[in-house]
């Protein structure tokens, strides 16, 4: 069991996916669950200040993570392919808001734990090492400077054809970091026994290799 936590744009999504592929382990993208709650709530017209209704949405989430024949991951919500919508900036903002609600986190707890199956799990998020898989053998806290994280997010969005300025992405990252770290429930922070890995200036392959070496050494 490997827990990878860190702020937006630290590269943890990519690193977690590649490490899981190399090890042949399962992958939990816990951020996608919070994103799905936000998306489902907005599709159902649930207000973002109605915490009881949001917790209900989280506990009834009808979501599936599928791998298409070409290897691409598809996310299906109540029968609809929402792969692109899940990754949008708007959904990300909504996810950060619903993730601050304790009842929503509680409702997603068991669903996340259920991803832990043989031969192993790589779980990526904000509280994998501190809350959900506090007993993980290896915990990695992946960071990068805010400037680098903004540049990476900006490039990702441009590659997807989304036209947004670097300044706007930077502001969004700073806001999201603040909300995720300052919330009272499961704030973003490294577990006491996490290994800190700063990916600033490191190519992704190097970061993946460092994590694989750590897995091999435990
Ligand atoms: O990693 P991401 O951008 O997909 O996450 C979306 C939001 O969900 C992020 O703002 C914080 C929240 N989140 C969380 O609170 N706990 C997690 N384990 C994963 C994500």
Image (cartoon, rainbow, N blue to C red):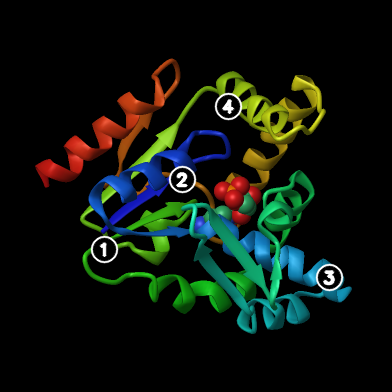
Which is closer to the viewer, label 2 or label 4?
A: 4
Q: Secondary structure at mark 2?
A: loop
Q: Is residue 65 visible?
A: yes
Which residue position holds label 4?
149
* Label 4 secondary element: helix
Instruction: Kindly tell me whether residue 99 is visible in this rendering.
Output: no
Q: Categorize mark 1 by other alpha carbons within 10 Å: few (<14), some (14-19), many (20+).
A: some
Using the numbered discs, state the Cα–Cα distance from disc 2 to disc 1 in whole angstroms.
16 Å
Marks 4/3: CA–CA distance: 30 Å
Label 2: few (<14), some or many (≥20) within 10 Å? some
Q: Which residue is mark 1?
A: 135
The mark that comes first in sequence, 1 or 3, is 3
Q: Quadrant of residue 123?
A: bottom left
On the image, numbered disc 3 is attached to which residue? 43
Q: Is residue 11 left or right of residue 190?
A: right
Q: Return the residue at label 2.
A: 189
């Amino acid at each position: 069991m490997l827990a990878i936590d860190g702020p937006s744009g630290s590269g943890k999504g990519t690193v977690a996916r590649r490490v899981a592929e190399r090890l042949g382990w399962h992958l939990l993208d816990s951020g996608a669950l919070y994103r799905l709650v936000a998306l489902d709530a907005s599709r159902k017209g649930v207000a973002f200040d109605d915490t009881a209704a949001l917790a209900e949405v989280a506990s009834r989430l009808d979501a599936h993570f599928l791998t298409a024949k070409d290897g691409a991951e598809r996310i299906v919500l109540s029968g609809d392919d929402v792969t692109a919508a899940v990754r949008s900036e708007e959904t990300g903002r909504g996810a950060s808001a619903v993730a601050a609600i304790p009842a929503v986190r509680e409702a997603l707890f068991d669903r996340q734990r259920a991803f832990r199956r043989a031969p192993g799990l790589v779980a990526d998020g904000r509280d994998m090492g501190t809350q959900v898989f506090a007993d993980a053998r290896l915990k990695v806290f992946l960071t990068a400077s805010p400037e680098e994280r903004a540049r990476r997010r900006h490039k990702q969005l441009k590659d997807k054809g989304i036209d947004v300025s670097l300044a706007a992405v930077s502001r969004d990252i700073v806001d999201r970091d603040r909300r995720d770290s300052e919330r009272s429930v499961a704030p973003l922070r490294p577990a006491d026994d996490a290994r800190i890995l700063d990916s600033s200036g490191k190519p992704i392959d190097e970061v993946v290799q460092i994590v694989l070496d750590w897995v091999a050494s435990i």
